[in-house]
Amino acid sequence: MIHIIVVDDHRLFRMAIRAALVHNHPDIQLIGEAENGPALFALPALTTANIVLLDINLPGMDGITVARLLRSRYPQIKILAISAENTSQTVKSMIEVGIDGFVSKQQGDLDELVQAIRSVANGIEYFGRDISAIIFEVFVAKKKNSAVPSEFTTREKEIIDLCRQGMLCKEIAGRLGIGVSTVNTHKKNIFLKLGINNTMEMVQYALKEGIIRIEH
């Protein structure tokens, strides 16, 4: 069972999420709702949540601040941003906080949201394709303390590039004709070479070093 909390200042939106999940997705349980950051941190259910669905444009304490506090106080909780606020600066700030996914209210739908929830719950980052495009435009690279990584295999380069396109592990497996577990193994090997632990950093490094390129 995936336990989620929705943080959004629009009551109708919270009601729509509740109705959609309760009736159609029994493996996802909504255990709490909050209209702002302080209300979220006052929820007793927060200690048992797996995922917080977090709007960014909140009154008072904005979503970026809420995400930072969640990361600090409850590092085990996954953060899935769901917002119409998807400017380059906002997406950049949320990525730097270390969110686990981002679904745009403007481009996404309930089916994509459910897919994102399940992906994030399974430890797989989820960024909608429009959000991925913004991430690559802003491209914030971290300084690495490790030495230059080992050479990448052809398969590893393929997987990095498909991740850049916003594809999930299941989609990558289908495209390459390999198992999902094989994709995850390749990604772990890439992470070890780079000394990182998430897909966004992997793609950012590959773009910076020219391992992969965005075709115009």
Image: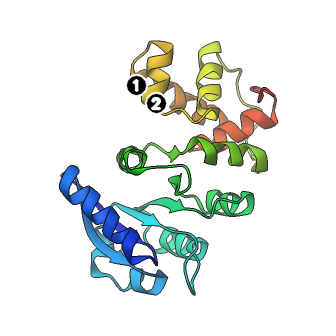
Picture quadrant of residue 123: top left
Query: Is 150 or 98 nearer to us in this picture?
Result: 98
Q: Secondary structure at mark 1?
A: helix
In the rendered image, residue 42, in percent from the top left (x then y), is placed at: 36, 86
Coloration mode: rainbow
Query: Is 97 or 84 nearer to us in this picture?
Result: 84
In the rendered image, residue 52, in percent from the top left (x then y), is placed at: 40, 65
User: Which residue is found at the position 56% from the left and 55% from the top?
Assistant: 106
Tell me the quarter of the image containing the C terminus: top right
Which residue does the numbered mark 2 point to in the structure image?
169
User: Which residue is found at the position 75% from the left and 46% from the top?
Assistant: 144
Question: What residue type is disc 2 on?
Answer: Cys
User: Horizontal placement of 15 versus 23: left or right?
Assistant: right
User: Horizontal placement of 207 versus 187: left or right?
Assistant: right
Q: Which mark is residue 180?
A: 1
Question: What residue type is disc 1 on?
Answer: Val
Residue 97 versus residue 212 in the image, above or below = below
In the rendered image, residue 40, in percent from the top left (x then y), is placed at: 40, 80
Picture quadrant of residue 35: bottom left
Residue 16 versus residue 185 in the image, above or below = below
User: Which residue is found at the position 47% from the left and 67% from the top?
Assistant: 54
Q: Which mark is residue 60?
A: none
Cα gap from disc 2 to disc 1, whole angstroms: 6 Å
User: Horizontal placement of 190 versus 125: left or right?
Assistant: right
Pointer 2 or 1: first along the chain: 2
From this viewpoint, is residue 139 visible?
Answer: no
Check whether the beta carbons of the residues at disc 2 and disc 1 lie within 8 A of each other: yes
Within 10 Å of the Cα at label 1, are there few (<14), some (14-19), or many (20+) other Cα atoms?
A: some
Residue 97 versus residue 197 in the image, above or below = below
Query: Is 154 or 100 nearer to us in this picture?
Result: 100
From this viewpoint, is residue 177 visible?
Answer: yes
Within 10 Å of the Cα at label 2, are there few (<14), some (14-19), or many (20+) other Cα atoms?
A: many
